[in-house]
Amino acid sequence: MAFRPLPARASAALIREAKPLKALFNQAQRLDRLQRLVESELQPAAREHCHVASWREGSLLLIVTDGHWATRLRYQQKRLLRQLQTFDEFTGLNKILFKVRPPTTPPRAPANPIHLSTASAQSLQETAEGIRDPNLRAALERLASHASPRKDAP
């Protein structure tokens, strides 16, 4: 007895037919619509730092990337509440809550540039002069050309 996989179906068909997926998709679309409405009332600089997490029972929960933006948005909370209440989607909005949640992607470590001292560059250049292989010689000369005096050197 051989296993026969079910034929592949289009993702749009799965979303329309599978009830759990349909409910999840509808919730995602609803949150996206609410996000766009909130962004329309925020200052342009604050938009990337504020995301709609939930809207239920008269309370809108916004996730903010750091305490600085949470504080700024709390100062604007009354104005934002009044403006959002004018939209049909926010009928019954009583309060806005802010939660600070830093981004989940780890920050990139700053690149540590390698400093090549003039003494090292001179050594590389002298070594390159004694090499017969033209490719290796050119590579050593290129490397030696990257020398720069360090600012913290005496």
Image (cartoon, rainbow, N blue to C red):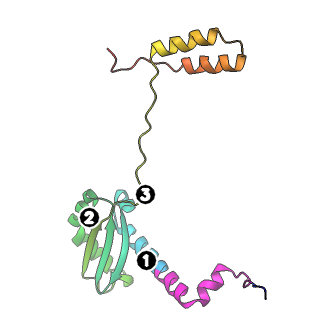
Q: CA distance from mark 3 to mark 2?
A: 23 Å
- The nearer-to-camera label among 3 and 2 is 3
Q: Earlier in the sequence, mark 3 or mark 2?
A: 2
Which of 57 and 75 lies nearest the eye of the viewer? Answer: 57
Residue at 43% of width from left, 71% of height from top? Answer: 36
Is 139 displayed left or right of 33 in the figure? right
Residue at position x 55%, y 17% in the image: 144
Q: Nearer the viewer, residue 150 or 46?
A: 150
Compare marks 1 and 3 and give the one earlier in the sequence. Answer: 1
Separation of residues labelled 1 and 2 (CA atoms): 19 Å
**Within the magenta stretch, is there residue 116?**
no
x, y percent for residue 152:
33, 21
Q: Residues within 10 Å of mark 3 (few under 14, many from 20)?
A: few
Q: Earlier in the sequence, mark 1 or mark 2?
A: 1
- Alpha-carbon distance for marks 1 and 3? 22 Å
In percent of width and height, residue 134 lies at: 71, 16
Q: The magenta stretch spans which residues?
A: 5-27
Circle 1 sits on which residue? 31
Decide if residue 127 is on the left or right side of residue 5: left
Q: Residue at x 72, y 16 (%)?
A: 133
In front: label 1 or label 3: 3
**151 horizontally vs 79: left or right:** right
Which type of secondary structure does the marked residue at label 1 adopt? helix
Where is residue 66, by image quadrant?
A: bottom left
* Dominant secondary structure (helix, strand or loop) of the stretch shown in magenta: helix
Q: Kindly identify which residue carries mark 3.
A: 105
Considering the numbered disc 2 on the image, is that residue within a helix, a strand or a loop? helix
The three-letter amino acid code for the residue at tag 2 is Leu
Q: Are marks 1 and 2 in contact (CB under 8 Å)?
A: no
